Image (cartoon, rainbow, N blue to C red):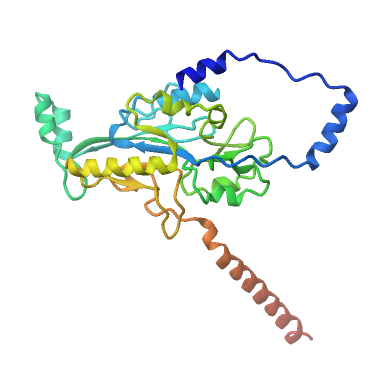
């Protein structure tokens, strides 16, 4: 990948040839009615995020902002552990979550200073049926790039597409800011920009993928918590990791989003977790709103017919 980046950086940058004024006017008149050629499908790519090795360094956040030229969110701590970004937004496409899990006993010891050595702190790190006594859960959150994405299904303008890598991509120049995608996403990933009013989210570094490069966040991750590649290979790699953790005495390790459920499709960006999804701020059982559509249509038609029937009754029976 590094050699490929050096190769691309050395390419000559040339501008498009100048157009005459007449040809430019004709192009702008004809362009809205033209259909572009469909891109040749490529192997599906995505992310596999291993939360057990995430150290919360936020290198992925910084790399994402730097590559995509996203503005800073400020340098004020939120009060939620060491987090300063709070959540995903139109200017934060990667967000590292810090989940602190401490028992009352260990917390009081930490506050009072009764723990005099690291060994005493480690000795308290036992796992119960409910939750561990002492640990930090860290997760680099981002768009899930769902196979059957509700945002894609809800978009009325065609601004949200599934590109040749089978990733969900928002075309900001086509987005009209209606926020249908925001309401449809069960993960709270998409947000409207305060500046332009368009919706934004992780693009899975589509521009880098087209040049044969891995996304900036995966390249910057120092612990290889973020894995990028063909989805089939990532699933196999993730399942081997889960088996390895089970053998090492971590029976609660499992994958989230790698396979479809009764209410939601599989995701091309999935996670290895060691606690309930809700602990990480993820829905325990994500539900595609599209599944409600048939019932909603039936109820709407039935309500309309009932209203018409009542109106007819009022008109004919109460007629003087």
Q: Is residue 15 above or below residue 147?
A: above
* Residue in the foreground of this view, choosing between 238 and 158: 238
Residue 227 visible, this orientation: yes
- Can residue 71 be seen by looking at this rendering? no
Q: Left or right: 98 with respect to 296? A: left
- Up-down: is 63 above or below 30? above
The reply, left or right, for residue 82 in relation to residue 294 is: left
Q: Position of residue 300 (x, y in %)?
A: 62, 68
The spot of residue 295 in percent (x, y) is 55, 67
- For the view shown, which residue lies furthest in the right direction? 22
The number of callouts visible is 0
Compared with 147, 23 (above or below) is above
Where in the figure is residue 315, as x and y percent of width and height? 76, 81
Task: Write the residue at 64% across / 35% down.
Answer: 172
Q: Quadrant of residue 94?
A: top left
Q: Nearer the viewer, residue 123 or 218?
A: 218
Q: Residue at x 80, y 37 (%)?
A: 31
Residue 224 placement: quadrant: top left
* Nearer to me, 240 or 31: 240
Image position, residue 267 (x, y; %): 45, 46
Residue 231: quadrant of the picture: top left
């Amino acid at each position: 990948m590094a050699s490929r980046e050096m190769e691309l950086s050395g390419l000559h940058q040339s501008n498009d040839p100048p157009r005459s004024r007449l040809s430019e006017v004709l192009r702008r008149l004809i362009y809205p009615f033209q259909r572009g050629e469909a891109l040749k499908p490529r192997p599906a790519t995505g992310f596999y995020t291993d939360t057990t090795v995430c150290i919360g360094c936020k290198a992925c956040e910084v790399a994402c902002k730097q590559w995509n030229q996203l503005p800073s969110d400020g340098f004020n701590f939120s009060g939620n552990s060491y987090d300063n970004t709070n959540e995903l937004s139109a200017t934060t496409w990667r967000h590292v979550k810090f989940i602190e899990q401490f028992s009352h006993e260990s917390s009081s010891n930490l506050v009072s200073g009764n723990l005099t050595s690291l060994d005493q702190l480690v000795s308290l790190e036992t796992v119960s049926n409910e939750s561990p006594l002492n640990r930090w859960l860290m997760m680099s959150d981002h768009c899930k790039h769902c196979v059957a994405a509700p945002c894609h299904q809800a978009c009325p303008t065609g601004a949200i597409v599934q590109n040749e890598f089978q990733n969900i991509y928002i075309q900001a120049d086509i987005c009209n800011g209606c926020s249908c995608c925001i309401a449809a996403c069960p993960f709270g990933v998409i947000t409207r920009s305060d500046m332009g009013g368009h919706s934004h989210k992780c693009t899975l570094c589509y521009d880098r993928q087209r040049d044969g490069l891995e996304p900036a966040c995966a390249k910057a991750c120092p612990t290889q918590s973020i894995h990028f590649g063909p989805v089939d290979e990532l699933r196999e790699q993730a399942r081997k990791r889960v088996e390895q953790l089970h053998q090492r005495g971590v029976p609660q390790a499992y994958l989230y989003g790698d396979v479809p459920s009764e209410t939601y499709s599989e995701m091309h960006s999935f996670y290895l977790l060691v606690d309930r999804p809700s602990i990480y701020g993820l829905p325990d059982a994500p539900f595609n709103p599209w599944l409600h559509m048939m019932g909603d249509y039936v109820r709407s038609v039935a309500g309309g017919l009932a209203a018409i029937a009542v109106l007819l009754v009022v008109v004919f029976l109460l007629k003087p």
